[in-house]
Image: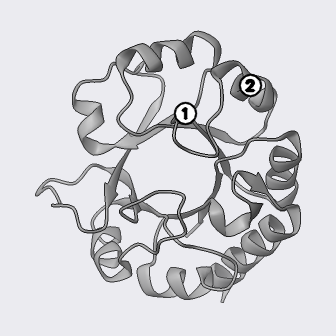
Amino acid sequence: MSLLIKICGITTEEGVDAAVAAGADAIGFVFHASSPRDLAPARAAALADSVPVLRFAVTRHPSQELVDQILAVFQPDAWQTDTADFQHLRVPAAIECWPVLRSGSVLPQLLPERMLFDAARSGAGERADWAVAAGLARRCSLILAGGLDSGNVGEAIARVRPGGVDVSSGVERAPGIKDPTMIRDFVRAARAAMAG
């Protein structure tokens, strides 16, 4: 089983280069005004240009106006936002939709085919509920997020058996600033856990 590794909340060329060099499968660009990782759509488009990995647009409760502003200049491969958001947003069919479910929220009876499971607050270093995540991972393709870093990703993979892992603050030297060494260590630890 292959593991998708996503480095989320990238804001600099250094972060993009480090993620690609480390062997990450996907990178995420955040469009959420209150986040220290918030980007203008044009900046995300410039950073994502010619990147040979999956590119995620990451939002939380965006308006359709914001979605349209992003899509006017940035064409992601996938869109990540809370499950309820997809009920009213129009996202082109060519873009994969990855709904986000969160620890502590009511889980739907019918799960999406693929999803991301996160802590209650994204990008804050809070750990998601791994027991709940493990149950969900047996029922759908799940990316585990929330409080992951190189020191715990191996245990998370062993306990949850997700289809992917997603890290943001766990590879940062300061809020919104990725650290190349931490990215490399995270990817190595995740790959080692899958091989072990």
Q: Crowdedness of circle 1 by 10 Å Cα count: few (<14), some, many (20+)? A: many
Query: Element under label 2?
Result: helix
Residue at the image point whose x is 46% and y is 70% from the top? 162
Query: Which quadrant is the C terminus positioned in?
Result: bottom right
Q: Is residue 23 left or right of residue 137?
A: right
- How far apart are the alpha carbons under marks 1 and 2? 11 Å
**What amino acid is labelled 2 in the image?**
Arg
Q: Is residue 159 left or right of residue 71?
A: left
Q: Nearer the viewer, residue 26 or 16?
A: 16
Residue 194 pos. (x, y %): 62, 79
Does any portion of residue 68 appear in the rendered image? yes
Residue at the image point whose x is 56% and y is 44% from the top? 35
Residue 106 pos. (x, y %): 15, 61
Q: Nearer the viewer, residue 35 or 187?
A: 35
Q: Is residue 151 left or right of residue 161?
A: right
Q: Residue furthest left?
A: 109
**What amino acid is labelled 1 in the image?**
Phe
In the rendered image of this protein, does residue 53 appear above or below residue 62?
below
In the rendered image of this protein, does residue 86 appear above or below residue 100?
above
Q: Residue furthest top?
A: 72
The residue beneath circle 1 is: 31
Evaluate if marks 1 and 2 touch, with contact meaning CB atoms under 8 Å apart: no
The residue beneath circle 2 is: 43
Residue 130 pos. (x, y %): 38, 80
Query: Which quadrant is the N terminus positioned in?
Result: bottom right
